[in-house]
Image (spheres, rainbow, N blue to C red):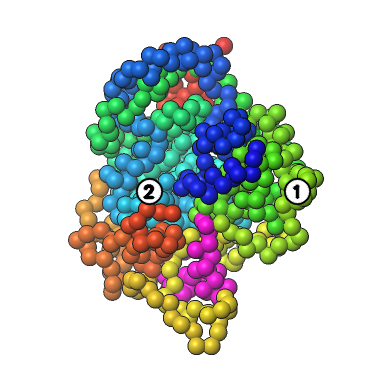
Amino acid sequence: MPDNVTSLFRSTAAHSPSMAALTRESDGAGPVDFCIPCNPYFPTPAMFEEMAARLRDIITYYPSSADTITAELCSLLQLPPQCVAMGNGSTELITWIDHLLVRESLAVPVPTFGRWTDQPMETGKRVDMFPLQESSGFALDLAQYAEFIRARGTRVAVICNPNNPDGGFLHKHAVVQFMDAMADLDLVVIDESFLEFADAENEPSVVHEAMLRPNVVVLRSLGKNFGLHGIRFGYLVANPALAGRVRSMLPKWNLNSFAEHVVFMLKEHGAEYAQSLHQVRRDRMDMSGQLSSLPGLTVYPSQGNFLFVRLPVGAEGTVVRDRLLTEHRILVRECGNKIGSSSRFLRLVVRPQVDVRRLVTGLEQVLYGTSRRGAAVSEQATGTAYSSGTAAVDRLVSQTNGAGTRGLAQAAGAGMPLPAAASAPAVGPGGGMPVPAAAGLPQPEPQPVPQEAPRPQPAPQPVPQPVPVPQPVPVPQPVPVPQPQPQQFPQPAAYPEPAPQPAPAAPPLAPAAAFAAPAPAPAPAQVPPATGPTPPGVPARGGLTAAQVRGTDGLSMAPATGWPGAQSWPDAAGMGQAAG
């Protein structure tokens, strides 16, 4: 593949150019795709032949209304149609969730799917980003996340399960506990776009629990697990009021004829679908083992249809990506533009073994110098080649003179609890490149800025701050609860709005105190007016806004229980056994 195709990565606003663009710039044949997380085993060749035979009718005529297509999907999923809204891909639903249900602030762990950070920023919302720690394998600690949300006074919480790009998984009971602990928030979103590839639990989905709660939305994908990203279809599940509010805003023909045709043919192909998920899970285990054998390459545990890998010390992800594409016709996802990640990380989609062997061979030649262009890994490096996703955060950390994330918190004077792993900058094995700095941490008050170096110099210049930083609000320490009892979740003091109707109380799971809402604290001296939302770009209680991480003003664009009909269908999370 010619070298000029790599220029497409620098001329697109997306993380990678489309397969169509890559094909046009090459000799007509696209690369082996380890970038787009599709199911490679579904639809079957017979299903593609059936769609090809119907192509003329599919693209000539209008589809049925979205209500008709949704009703057929709900019949397959055994979900009530009034609790479901179908969208033109998950991103359309994320957009409407932001416009309709997110009033002023949203919390999300990072790194994660970029639309969960970028979409609210584009509409002027405050995004509080909870950094996942490389030292803990990017695992999400729900107790610490809950404390983070309480400290920030965030009104909407997002969890991706499994998370993209690392594939981290949360068990159902823990997610349900978190949902109940956050019952006083405006909204809790559980993004299950990749859950059907998980095998750590038989029934991991919380769709049925979401329908019973007043403030929970579950997002599901169809394109990823059905291997049809180009069709653009997905759905959300919530109580009838929330689902109906989103559904009422969607265009009547927001779903195309391809989506309709696929939904109506699914009930005849349940056994093939279940087998495809089983094969992806087997391939994931095999691919993880092969990649783990490469010297210096770290592979993180995943329950998605992709693997998150850290390149050896000294390897720059953009160089590895470009050389894999031009020398080996292999397309990979370099994660330098994901907040909370760096260009040392790749996300690799699970593919059949024959493709994985080709990937491993390509990585060996690019990383270790067995190709004509030599090795991409230099001698032990200092690790400064971060991409845009973490560069702004690294600059902020450097302003603390090496104190790292703990220094940021101390400089801001905020009482926000930090993850345990954030007490010192983590470093990869054998030294080298440090872990990317955490986004979404408290913003420091004006500090002296060095003129030429990241160390203090005489006569420092103060850093201008566009907005005043409120005085710190002490965060109460969790109090042990001797016996399980229903918890009360009062509104944070800075947001005295009517409390939502509470969900049915349930005995909390241990550790209950970790999820407890703090007692109302006296309002800080400088807070946004209680009569309206936080102005765009204004941190809450010393928080660091996503707009500041991105370097923008916050307003401009950022640079089921069974499947009826066919007994072979798995349950709504894809965990059931195929019949016969």
Q: Is residue 479 above or below residue 486?
A: below
Q: Is residue 16 above or below residue 577?
A: below
Most foreground residue, 485 or 517:
517
Q: Are marks 1 and 2 in contact (CB under 8 Å)?
A: no
Q: Is residue 201 visible?
A: no
Residue lying at 72% horizontally and 52% vertically, measured from the top left: 376
Residue lying at 51% horizontally and 51% vertically, measured from the top left: 338
Eye-nearest disc, 1 or 2: 1
Q: Say few, some or many: other residues with alpha carbon within 10 Å of mark 2 (under 14 / 14 to 19 / 20 or more).
A: many
Name the mark on residue 119.
2
Q: Which residue is mark 1?
A: 373
Residue lying at 45% horizontally and 17% vertically, measured from the top left: 266
Horizontally, residue 84 falls left or right of residue 348, namely left
Asked if residue 414 lies in the magenta stretch, the reply is yes
From which residue to which does the magenta span run?
388-417
- Tell me where residue 3 appears, x and y as whole percent: 64, 44
